[in-house]
Image (cartoon, rainbow, N blue to C red):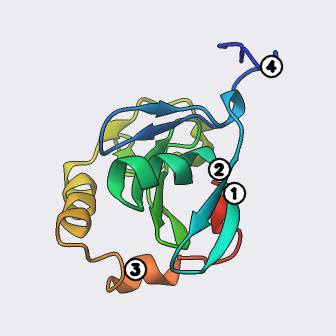
């Protein structure tokens, strides 16, 4: 386990940006007070939100390494998109508890790419059904 330089403990839920490949480690940095023009308020943004603003203009796609799910951040909403990694039987292993090898699901990956390239997160009913607007800024 990698030891965090700041807190001397194993890293909690690192996230890999699927847009640029940057590894975001929430345990290794601090939240930043940022002004959100659309809301006309300041928020303490978490590392993934900060990175999404810098890298994707507010859109963030992050593979949560320790759970194999995809965190989608869009404006002031977020959702955990189903994993793009499946086992040999086509099943997810959320939280990686079974210890079986996981393989990239090209079908799920293509669906995620289609949603991203067509900016359809706001219109996709599957994504909207699992989207939350509360505590969006903590990620």
* Relative depth, front residue between 82 and 71: 71
- Name the disc covering residue 46, or none: 2
- On the image, the x and y values in percent for residue 37 come to 52, 75
Question: Gap between marks 1 and 3, in whole Å?
Answer: 23 Å
Q: Quarter of the image for the C terminus: give it.
A: bottom right
Residue found at x 55% / y 73% = 76
Q: Secondary structure at mark 4?
A: loop
Q: CA distance from mark 2 to mark 4?
A: 19 Å
Q: Which mark is residue 73?
A: none
- Name the residue tied to disc 4: 9
Residue 45 appears at what percent x and percent y? 65, 55
Front-lying residue, 28 or 83? 28
Please say if 93 is above or below 79: above
- The picture quadrant where one finds residue 116 is bottom left
Per the image, the residue denoted by label 3 is 126
* Sequence-first tag of 4 and 1: 4
Looking at the picture, how far across and down is residue 79, in whole percent? 52, 67
Q: Quadrant of the N terminus?
A: top right
- Label 2 or label 4, whichever comes before in sequence order: 4
Q: Which mark is first along the chain, 3 or 1?
A: 3
Which type of secondary structure does the marked residue at label 1 adopt? helix
Give the residue pinned by disc 1: 138
Q: Are marks 1 and 2 in contact (CB under 8 Å)?
A: yes
Q: Is residue 30 placed above or below 94 in the rendered structure?
A: above
- Disc 1/disc 2 C-alpha distance (Å): 5 Å
């Amino acid at each position: 386990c990698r030891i965090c330089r700041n807190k001397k403990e194993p890293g909690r839920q690192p996230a890999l940006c699927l847009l640029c490949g940057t590894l975001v480690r929430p345990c290794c940095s601090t939240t930043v007070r940022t002004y959100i023009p659309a809301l006309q308020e300041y928020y303490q943004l978490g590392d993934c939100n900060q990175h999404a603003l810098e890298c994707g203009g507010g859109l963030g796609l992050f593979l949560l390494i320790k759970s194999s799910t995809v965190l989608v951040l869009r404006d002031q909403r977020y959702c955990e998109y189903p994993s793009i990694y499946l086992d040999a039987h086509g099943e997810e292993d959320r939280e990686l508890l079974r210890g079986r090898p996981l393989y990239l699901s090209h079908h799920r990956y293509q669906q995620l790419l289609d949603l991203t390239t067509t900016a359809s997160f706001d219109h996709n009913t599957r994504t909207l059904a699992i989207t939350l607007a509360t505590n969006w800024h903590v990620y």
